């Protein structure tokens, strides 16, 4: 067990520990934590034995986190004016990132535009992800070519959080939503952000739970903002 960790190094390690444990960080920021208990937990995990130094580091960092209250209120202010939309029977087709695939998709997008059908396409260095209604699955596969397909995921649900335009200039909103979904044990298949829409793709088995979690985020935001007014 290390006994002579420099105070500055220990303070930094304590801060990093809190940052990498979102639930602890949230409680520290709100002052809802027993610092002695937290210090003992950190000491055990970091293998240090200076409880007083760890407690001081925790309290000092808590003071800095409290400064972010205004930023948290900006996030809640956006969420209180957000609304949810849900689409079932969604699928995800992942294809190779090849210029021939993109060329073929261009014609399909033109058809979708004329048919007023929504389809999202996200390109990365290694793949192209296409999110669409399940009815379009075979059409997408035929267009792209089966030899270009990497993976097909079905039985998915798309939940869109539609927010005010100020979300574009406010950091942390998407992270806040993802944290709440993650804490509820919900696996997010894909996340897409398009201007003021934040779209989560999840499995049908998580549909009710995910919708409930996001609804509670919005309702809680409304109550907190109203109480602060």
Image (cartoon, rainbow, N blue to C red):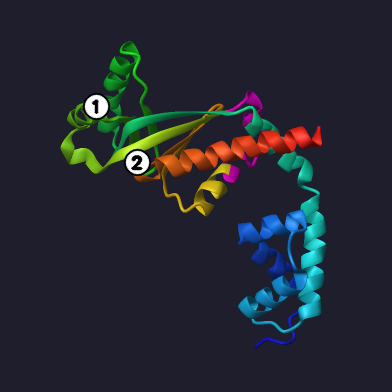
Magenta stretch bounds? 163-176
Give the SS element for disc 1: helix
Q: Which mark is residue 165?
A: none
Which residue is label 2 attached to? 204
Task: Give the position of the C terminus as an image quadrant.
Answer: top right
Q: Residue at x 76, y 69 (%)?
A: 35
User: In the picture, residue 15 is in which quadrant?
Assistant: bottom right
Tell me which corner region of the image, top left, top right, bottom left or bottom right, holds residue 32. bottom right
Q: Position of residue 38 (x, y in %)?
A: 70, 71
Q: Residue at x 43, y 30 (%)?
A: 86
Q: Does the magenta portion include 168?
A: yes
| Residue bearing mark 1 | 135
Instruction: Give the prevailing secondary structure in the magenta stretch.
Output: helix
Name the residue located 66 percent from the left edge and 27 percent from the top edge.
Answer: 166
Mark 1 vs 2, N-terminal side: 1
Image height of 188 relative to 55, above or below:
above
Q: Is residue 7 left or right of residue 148?
A: right
């Amino acid at each position: 067990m290390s006994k002579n960790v420099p105070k500055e190094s220990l303070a930094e390690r304590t801060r990093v520990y809190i940052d990498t444990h979102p639930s602890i960080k949230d409680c520290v920021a709100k002052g809802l934590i027993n610092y002695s208990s937290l210090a003992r937990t950190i000491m055990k995990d970091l293998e240090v034995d200076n409880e007083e130094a760890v407690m001081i580091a925790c309290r000092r960092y808590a003071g800095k986190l409290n400064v972010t209250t205004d930023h948290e209120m900006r996030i809640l202010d956006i969420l209180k004016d957000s609304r949810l939309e849900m689409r079932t029977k969604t699928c995800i087709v992942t294809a190779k990132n090849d210029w021939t695939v993109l060329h073929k998709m261009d014609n399909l997008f033109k058809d979708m535009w004329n048919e007023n059908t929504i389809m999202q396409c996200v390109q990365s260095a290694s793949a192209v992800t296409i999110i669409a209604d399940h009815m379009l699955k075979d059409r997408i596969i035929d267009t792209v070519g089966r030899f270009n397909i990497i993976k097909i995921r079905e039985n998915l649900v798309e939940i869109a959080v539609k927010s005010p335009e100020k979300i574009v200039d406010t950091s942390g909103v998407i992270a806040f939503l993802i944290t709440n979904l993650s804490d509820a044990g919900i696996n997010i298949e894909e996340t897409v952000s398009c201007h003021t829409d934040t779209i989560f793709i999840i499995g049908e088995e998580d549909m009710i739970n995910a919708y409930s979690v996001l609804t509670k985020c919005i309702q809680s935001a409304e109550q907190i903002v109203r109480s602060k007014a």
